[in-house]
Image (cartoon, grey):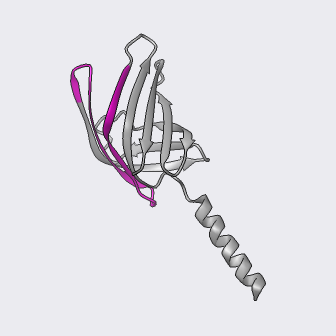
Amino acid sequence: MKKVLFIGVFCSLLIISCSPNVVGTWNIDRYEVDNQKGQNFTTRNAGKLVINKNGTGEKNVEYNMFQSEFSDVQDFKWIMQGDDLMTITSKNPTEDSEFDKTWIMVTNKKKEQLWKSTDGKNSVQILKLSKD
């Protein structure tokens, strides 16, 4: 009886510990674009990402860059590839999104995330996320 209980508790802890830290509502504390041409950009408090356990989510992102306003408010799908790669794909592909790509999770903690990606044109995007 003790053996069965131990195995059940162990399996439960294993499942809980393997659940992604990414699930939840994240504040976008910093969105940064590092362009090798010297056109670097950083914005603070750019919005929120809601990441649901079922592989869906919602973007509510608004920021100004070089005197232009950008808004990205739409639903998306996400998938983890290994422990540190997350791909985001908007459900409405006709709307451009700077966030639709594969992100490398440099920091993947329960209350703090740091993601990096590239656009393939010598530009690196950085997202610093936090949970309340």
Count the marks. Answer: 0
Furthest toward the front, the residue is 132
Q: Residue at x 49, y 37 (%)?
A: 115
Q: Position of residue 78 (x, y in %)?
A: 45, 49
- Is the magenta region chiefly helix, strand or loop? strand
Q: Residue at x 21, y 20 (%)?
A: 67
Residue 61 sits inside the magenta stretch: yes
Relative depth, front residue between 80 and 67? 67
Q: Residue at image x 48%, y 18%?
A: 122
Quick check: 20 above or below 125?
below
Which quadrant of the figure contains the N terminus? Answer: bottom right
State left or right for residue 17 relative to residue 129.
Answer: right
Q: Is residue 81 magenta?
A: no
**Percent of width and height locating residue 103:** 50, 37
Magenta stretch?
Answer: 41-69
Look at 31% across and 34% down and name the residue there: 96
Q: Position of residue 28 (x, y in %)?
A: 37, 40
